[in-house]
Image (tube, grey):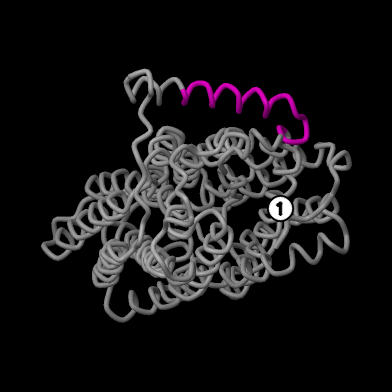
Amino acid sequence: MPSHHPVQPDPVQPDPAQPHPDQPDPDRLDPGPPARRGLPLLISNALDAAGRQAADLATDVLAVVVLGASAAQMGVLNALGTLAFLVLGIPVGVIVDRSPTVRLLLGSGVVRTLLLTSVVLAWSLDVLTMMHLYAVALLAGTAALVAETTQTAIVPRVVGTAGVSRLVSRLQSAESVITLVVPVLAGGLVALSGAGVTLAVGATLTLLAALVVLRLPVQSVESTGSAEGEPGARAALARFFHEAHLGWATLRSRPALWRLSLGTMSVNLGLAVYSAIEVVLVLRELDLGAATLGLIMSAGGVGGLLGSLVAVPLADRLGVPRVLRGSLLLLAPTAALTLVALLDRDRATAWLLAGTFLWGVVIVAYNVVNAGLTAELTPTELLGRVGATRRTLTMGIVPVGGVAGGLLADSAGMVTTVAAWIVLNSVGAAIALTAPLDAAKGTPPEG
């Protein structure tokens, strides 16, 4: 349940030099303005994000408060929830990219609803176990990967090529607002009615998100099977290995891109280490309560929103390399405020709120500027393949950090684990700062 906005690689985009064979003709889409055609997807995405936020908070509280989970167990729980992004990220992307459909969104939503409902029933019958939560985290994480990949891939079939950028921006903006509001509401609901009730609400929102997509107008396209009769599975496998190799070779051949990716890996590893202990630290170590936990999470959302607003103007004024380096230098000092909270427990809430807010500003500003610079450093015809490779590297490290963080906290304590987060931020910044950024044009991302 990371509330600190992990560093996101540039989104995987289709290669402009290789038009997608399934791309629909915008003129053949259902009548109506793009904004109206995309409204069901926007509502579904918002409901899905709200359900995910509520369910994540409630599950973590159940694990810590009801089952007495240790930091190591929370690390495993968080790792299992993101494991699919490491193991299945590129294969799922290839499969979904070939056929993004409403059935995938509906199916993944129903599966996650059933999984969350099983936890609610087990809790109500007093038979809930950590093994049950582990299984749900793994399966729900896989279903979430399918949903998140499909939500983006299906956009061209809904609004046509011309409306893609606007609808994707609206989806991201809506999710930012949800990230800001829902944690506070979920924390309050946990305090008033308990984690089980909050989880039931999360499951309901997830189901509603799945049902709303039934109203989504999607252009049908013909299957893209091989004209030579080659089996689809063999073609997909060959495509997967080819794209993975080309993406890796391109990434390694560009020093700036490679060092930025390595730096991002270290920062995400550190964040995963901290995320494994965050709930235990707030609820058990500092005994601040579920409502305060929700407030802390929302402080990160507010900071992230501010970071997204100031990143481009700052890059316009100061240049991309300078803003990128400044944000990198602020990562470790910002994380250190959490260490101060552990040492100054009388004012722990204030320190955590300040640290989480500032982290949101810094990390999202870095995300925005880094995404634009990464796109500039990548050959246009290879954006999709390089993006997929970077995502596997930078997000695939998260499960490792989750397990390591939990084990470290149990064996060496909270202070040592938070210190490890600070060190990993410093290492990531040091690596990324060696990237030859001045060789790039230094133009900020548009929008």
**Left or right of 167 on screen, residue 63:** left
Position of residue 154 relative to residue 407, above or below, is below
Mark 1 residue crowding within 10 angstroms, few (<14) / some (14–19) / many (20+):
many
Residue position marked by numbered label 1 in the rendering: 332
Look at the image and tell me in which quarter the N terminus lies. bottom left
| Residue 326 screen position, x and y as percent | 81, 55
- Quarter holding residue 87: top left
Q: Is residue 130 visible?
A: yes
Say if residue 73 shows up in the picture. Answer: no
**Residue drawn where x is 79% and y is 66% of the image:** 313
For this orientation, the residue located farthest to the left is: 125
Q: Nearer the viewer, residue 353 or 39?
A: 39
Q: Is residue 254 magenta?
A: yes
Confirm whether the magenta stretch covers residue 400.
Answer: no
SS of the residue at dot 1? helix
Residue 273 in the figure: left or right of residue 432: left
Viewer-proximal residue among 335 and 377: 377
Report the residue at 75% width, 38% height from top.
377
Residue 400 point in image, percent of width and height? 48, 37
Determine which quarter of the picture holds residue 266. Answer: top right
Which residue appears at 36% of the width and 56% of the height?
Answer: 218
Rendered-image quadrant of the C terminus: bottom right
Extent of the magenta region: 239-258
Corner quadrant of residue 45: bottom left
- Amino acid at dot 1: Ala
Q: Main secondary structure of the magenta part?
A: helix
Check the image and name the residue furthest to the bottom: 192
Q: Is residue 359 left or right of residue 4?
A: right
The reply, left or right, for residue 319 in relation to residue 1 is right
Pick whichever, 302 or 171, lies toward us.
Answer: 171
